[in-house]
Image (tube, rainbow, N blue to C red):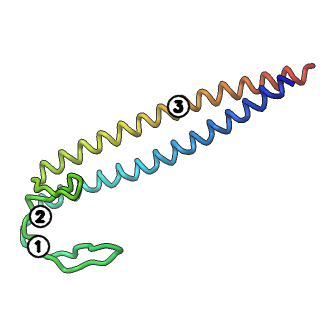
Amino acid sequence: MQKEQEIQQKYILLQMIDNQMKQIDANMQEIAVRNEGLISLKAHLDELNATKSNVKLKAPIGAGIYVDAELKNTKDVYVNVGAGIVVKKTIAEAKNLVDKQITEVEKAIDHLGKGMENLSTKAQETQHELQHLMGTEHEH
């Protein structure tokens, strides 16, 4: 009877590990999308820096809707620093901020990857223990 309980506990542990791995995978995908957005933003800042002032363009206002606009200043951008506070920054300062965010996102991806490796190792160990328990059960 004790062996059955151990087997059941190992199955439950494997299910928990599987759920944790799925959650980490979902988090990694979300973070990867954020990272792609930051990389794209950095490229847009480079394009903006190379653009002349007084350029006409279509500016998005949301949900795929655009308005005609004129870009008067291509050397500065406005950055939301939190709590609804917007600060004027140069393109270089904004790129530096984006680089820091990219670094933080990459650290998060690395951290999650290590967590995934640890869970994978634990799953393999648990699987071996389960096979051993089931193998010894069949021998008796």
Instruction: Kindly identify which residue carries mark 3.
Output: 117
3D distance between C-alphas at marks 3 and 2: 45 Å
Which secondary structure, mark 2?
A: loop
3D distance between C-alphas at marks 3 and 1: 50 Å
108 with respect to 135 (left or right): left
Mark 1 and 2 residues: CB-CB less than 8 Å, in contact? yes
Residue at (70% x, 29% y) in the render = 127
- Position of residue 10 measured from the top left corner of the image (x, y, whole percent): 72, 30
Instruction: Kindly identify which residue carries mark 2.
Output: 51
Q: Amino acid at mark 1?
A: Val
Which secondary structure, mark 3?
A: helix
Residue at (23% x, 55% y) in the render = 83
Q: Amino acid at mark 3?
A: Glu
Instruction: Kindly identify which residue carries mark 1.
Output: 55
Residue at (10% x, 56% y) in the render = 88
Comparing labels 3 and 1, the label whose residue is closer to the camera: 3
- Position of residue 129 measured from the top left corner of the image (x, y, whole percent): 73, 23
Please tell me which of labels 3 and 2 falls first in the chain: 2
- Position of residue 28 measured from the top left corner of the image (x, y, whole percent): 46, 45
Q: Is residue 127 above or below residue 70?
A: above
Which secondary structure, mark 1?
A: strand
93 with respect to 105 (left or right): left
3D distance between C-alphas at marks 1 and 2: 8 Å
Q: Residue furthest right?
A: 140
- Position of residue 100 measured from the top left corner of the image (x, y, whole percent): 24, 42
Q: Quadrant of residue 3?
A: top right
35 with respect to 20 (left or right): left
Badge 1: residue crowd in 10 Å (few <14, some 14–19, many ≥20): few
